Amino acid sequence: MRRLFCMGLGLFLAWAVAAQAAPGQESLAIDREHVRVWTVDYPGEPLRGFRAVTTVRSSLSALVSLLTDTSVATDWLYRTKRMQLLHSDPRAGTFTVVAEMDFWPLPNRDAVVEGRLHQDPVTHVVTIESRAVRSDAVPPRPGVLRMHDMRGRWEFRPLGDGLV
């Protein structure tokens, strides 16, 4: 569960990364309890991006199911206050969600996020790429700041022996 928490924390932090700037050099920030996190500065942006790596004992399908089940996102995804599925096309592997994050002590943030899930037929690696989009589908909520520049990427690699 701790590793899932770290994955959730990672997604939460990814929301703060600007999608437009070219990244600088990564530096290792955390290396403990089988979790490694590298940070990276984006020129002209006040917040850092990051890359996190860990190994979990799970099936590939269970991890992907957890990440794509918006009905339980607020139970495990760090500081996620609300997650609503707006659109899903399993055949195309595409989805759109609106998510609100608790940014205490600052005002909460939300984003309308489009994503695509893809599995490599040879390596079985599952990649989920997402980015915030401007959308009128969900009007901004009073007191919640809408994020428009965000991107994220999850990569699940089957390692064998029940590890991903």
Image (cartoon, rainbow, N blue to C red):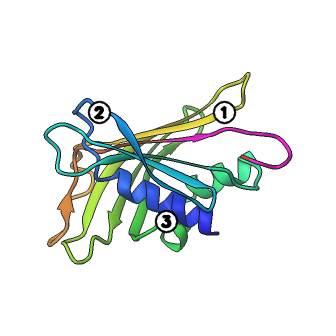
The front one of 69 and 76 is 76
Report which residue position mark 1 lands on. 125
Q: Is residue 161 magenta?
A: yes
Q: Which residues are magenta?
A: 154-163
At 26% from the left and 76% from the top, the residue drawn is 104
Q: Is residue 18 left or right of residue 26?
A: left
Query: In terms of secondary structure, where does tag 3 sit?
Result: loop
Q: Which residue is mark 3?
A: 77
Disc 2 on helix, strand or loop? loop
Indicate which disc residue 2 carries: none
Q: Quadrant of residue 102?
A: bottom left
Mark 1 / mark 3, whichever is N-terminal: 3
Count of all numbered marks drawn on residues in the image: 3
Q: Residue at x 39, y 46 (%)?
A: 50
Q: Which residue is mark 2?
A: 23
Q: Is residue 146 above or below residue 125?
A: below
Viewer-proximal residue among 22 and 124: 22
Amino acid type at circle 1 is Val
Going by the numbered disc 2, the residue's amino acid type is Pro
Queried whether the magenta region covers residue 142, the answer comes back as: no
Earlier-in-chain disc, 3 versus 2:
2
Q: Residues within 10 Å of mark 1 (few under 14, many from 20)?
A: some
Mark sitting earlier along the chain (1/2):
2
Query: How far from the left and from the top, in percent, is residue 13?
Result: 36, 56
